[in-house]
Structure formats: structure tokens, C-alpha cells
Image (cartoon, rainbow, N blue to C red):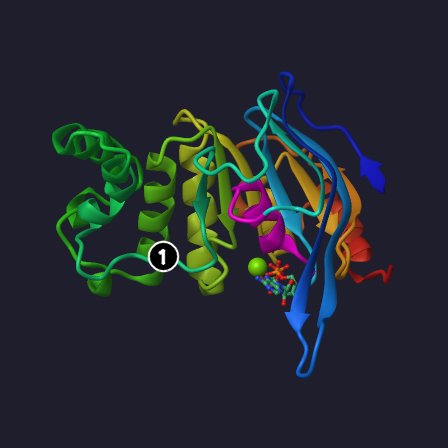
Amino acid sequence: MQEHTGARSFASGYLEVKNLYKTYYLPKRETGSIAVPTLEDISFTVKKGEFISIIGPSGCGKSTLFNLISGLEIPDKGQIILDGKEIIGQKGHVSYMLQKDLLLPWRTVLENCILGLELQNVPKREAINTANCLLADFNLSEFAGSYPASLSGGMRQRVAFLRTMLAGRELLLLDEPFGALDAYTKSEMHDWLAGIWPRISHPTVLFITHDVEEALLLSDNVYVLGPRPAKLKLQLSVSLQRPRTRKLVVEKGFIEMKRILMDSLFTLG
Ligand SMILES: Nc1ncnc2c1ncn2[C@@H]1O[C@H](COP(=O)(O)OP(=O)(O)OP(=O)(O)O)[C@@H](O)[C@H]1O
Ligand SMILES: [Mg+2]
């Protein structure tokens, strides 16, 4: 695995993924099954407060990695250590935003936002107060009483993102949260996120994307996975100053990092 460094430094290691392997087995028509090796010897360490982007070809195993870290699935081999404790197969340690926004259409924005808190038995009044504070930060206060069908794509993603943040875990897994948005709305989401990130108390983030520029604009580190079975091919430390704006994408340092990522993504093996 290649490593490029130079970004700001963080406190101690927080999430440690060590030598992770996962193979799925698909049923065959007559007997037996077909092995689908998906992750192969994945190891990395994330420091508390870091924003990590994960990029890699479609089907390489990115969502699988999140399913393992979240405890929804179990690896064949390897360790996942969060804050010093092994968490394989254990749910409840992470806030996880799945590839689709999955807002409940019969609940208002506010009711969708507090869903995770309700499931944790937080009293409703307290849940609403907590959500109301973040709704303002996310520019959604006016829409607290609206239903998802009346929101734009970008707003729906913000609601789903807010709901994930409100689940209150220290580790946030975001699986292509802006993937379905058009380029303009996505760019607005980047500016919005870059603006609020330093102002709010933010968790450690693992963020899956197919968009190299998005990864560079948002992250402290970018990991590149190779085709299935995914191996970690490259770890790029993003040394660009914050706050980062769209203007950066035409600057020399940005273009150089983009070239490194594209070379890694499109080099076989
Ligand atoms: N539950 C499962 N049972 C069998 N195979 C699975 C299962 N989940 C994922 N796979 C297979 O594992 C491989 C990786 O899937 P995964 O969803 O992790 O890819 P991905 O990198 O997230 O792709 P994308 O970028 O398209 O979302 C695929 O070949 C997929 O078919
Ligand atoms: Mg996926």
C-alpha cells in the first residue's frame, strides 16, 4: 500500500481495522456454493475526529466494510477495535447512514430526525429540543413540520444526515450520502458541510464516495480500495487548508492530489 502524508495531526488512534477478510457464498443451482471473496487483508487506523473518505470501484466491497464495522455482518478473519475494545458483531457503536436516505414518508422532518433518539428511549421533549438545535444548523428549521415528499433531494439528504448525527455515536459511517444528487446540489452540500463542520462538535467520519473531488474537499485522509477482493491500495493525507471551497479544485496542489488518486483508482492490481 502506498502512503502520502502531510496533513494536520490528530490525537491517538481511535478505530483500528486489522487484517480484515470477508468472503460471501452464493448458492449454486445444484449443490454447493460459489465463493465471492470481497475484502482481503484490510488494515488501517483512524484517529479521533478525522474525516476519512473511502473510494474504490463499484462492487469492490466498500459497503461490506461498513457492514462489518457497524456489526451488521461478521468478518471471516481480522479485528475491529474501537476505542480500545473489540467490536466485531456488536451493534450500537456507530451511527450509520445507508446508501439510500430511507426517510419514513409518514413522519415529518422533525419526527424523522428524532427516530434514533426515540429508539434509545430518550424522552420525546428532550429529543425534540436536541433536534431543534441541529435543525437550525442544517438550515431546516422552517421545514420541521414538512413531510419528506415535499423536500428537494438535497434537503432529504440533509435530514437523513442530521438523523444519523443525532443518533449520537462518536463514529459516523456515511455511505455515499451525496451520491444521488446533481452536481450543483452536491456542490452546495459540500459548501454547507465545510461551513458547519468547524462549528459543531463533530464525530469521527468514514465517508464512502465515488467522487474524487468530493473526497479531497471534505477529508483529512483518503483511502483507495482496489477491485474486488478489495485491498487498500493507497492512503493519501490531504494537506489542504480549511475551510475549503469549490475554488480549490483548479489550484495546483489540488490537481496534483487528484492525479495521485485517479492514477491509483485506474491502475489495475
Ligand atoms: N449479503 C451478501 N451476499 C452475497 N454477496 C454480497 C452480499 N453483500 C455484498 N455482496 C457482494 O459483495 C461484493 C461487494 O459488495 P458491496 O456492496 O460491498 O460493494 P460496494 O463497493 O459498496 O459497491 P457500490 O460502489 O456499487 O455500492 C459484490 O460482489 C456484492 O455482490
Ligand atoms: Mg456500496
Looking at this view, name the residue that lies furthest to the front. 31
In the image, residue 204 lies at what x, y percent?
53, 31
Residue for point 61% across, 53% down: 64
Reading the image, the residue beneath label 1 is 154
Nearer-the-camera pick, 259 or 203: 203
The image quadrant of residue 207 is top right
Q: Which amino acid does label 1 sit on?
A: Gly
Please indicate whether residue 152 sits to the left or right of residue 187 in the image.
left
Q: Give the vertical position of 254 relative to 12 (above or below).
A: below
| SS at circle 1 | helix
- Give the quadrant of ligand 1: bottom right
Is residue 138 part of the magenta span, yes or no? no
Q: Specify start and end residues of the magenta stretch as a single range.
A: 58-73
In the image, residue 35 lies at what x, y percent?
74, 66
Looking at this view, name the residue that lies furthest to the bottom. 30
Please indicate whether residue 76 sits to the left or right of residue 172 in the image.
right
Looking at this view, name the residue that lies furthest to the top. 11
